[in-house]
Image (cartoon, helix red, strand yellow):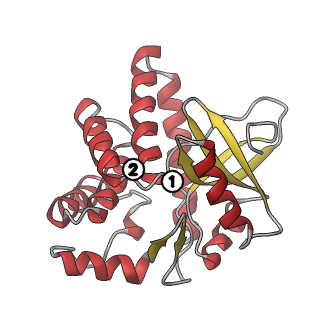
Amino acid sequence: MRKYLVHIIIWMIQLCMLISGRSADGSSRELHLFDLAYNSYLSYQPEKAVEGFRLFLEEFPHSSAKDAALFWYAKALLQIQSTDEAEKAFACIREEFPESPFLCYLPEAPVTTQKGAADHDARNEGEEVGSGRKTGTSQNPALPVARAEPTRDGMLTAYALQVGSFKTRESAEILKKSIQKKVARNRITICEQGDYFKVRITGFKDVEEINLMHRWGIEGLVIRTNEKACGL
């Protein structure tokens, strides 16, 4: 599994390089669409996530983040029981991105029925309970996905796990209190960025420490940034 984590980190670095080489308007639009869609997924709004990732894929069909967008697009489709479309997205990842770090997280068998999708979710991801998530297995690590926030010169690298993104602080506070009971030794912060209140678990030395959160039924977006960044 460590091999795939290395691939994911390399992918994040490549994405940052790609962004730095594009025009300001193009890269801003691309990141904006991806963030909106992923925030919808983290906020348990699969319909909005599906619409967001669909728009992202239509506007940026050659994006270096296409495999990530396809993966989360398929995950959101499974949540709304669109299993045929989800399987098409998974198949696209297998065909177009044979080296993608997301391959190890794809279902082994095609998910073609609603029952199959429900069984897959119950075995591998668990069900959402209240404002948190209950995991059905402890073998797979939390999935470190999306993009990295750039570090600043002279700053030490820090890691956090973003577990939710909400439009209101009240919703973020509910999730924070729920998770704090499970991980009392970690600091949980609410970071206000744009129109969203993002809940982050902080105090990790590396990605492997974050993966241990899976045993508590917690997964989310790994943030690699500097020690002075918001929420760290």
Q: Are marks 1 and 2 in contact (CB under 8 Å)?
A: yes
Of the pair 100 and 185, the residue shown nearer to us: 185
- The percent coordinates of residue 122 (x first, y second) are 38, 81
Give SS at disc 2.
helix
Give SS at disc 1.
loop
Callout 2, which amino acid? Ala
Residue at the front extreme? Answer: 170
User: Which label's residue is closer to the chain start, 1 or 2?
Assistant: 2
Of the pair 60 and 78, the residue shown nearer to us: 78
User: Relative to 66, does residue 216 appear above or below in the rendering?
Assistant: below
Q: Disc 1 versus disc 2: distance between alpha carbons?
A: 7 Å
Label 2 neighbour load within 10 Å: few <14, some 14-19, many 20+: many
User: Relative to 49, does residue 83 appear above or below in the rendering?
Assistant: below
- For this view, does 221 lie left or right of residue 83? right
Q: Residue 68: which numbered mark, if any?
A: 2
Which residue: 60% across, 73% down? 214
Q: Residue 145: which numbered mark, if any?
A: 1
- The percent coordinates of residue 26 (x first, y second) are 39, 20
Which residue: 29% across, 48% down? 50
- The percent coordinates of residue 114 (x first, y second) are 19, 75
Of the pair 215 and 175, the residue shown nearer to us: 175
Quadrant into which the N terminus falls? bottom right
The picture quadrant where one finds residue 30 is top left
Of the pair 200 and 13, the residue shown nearer to us: 200
- For this view, does 150 lie left or right of residue 60? right
- The percent coordinates of residue 138 (x first, y second) are 56, 83
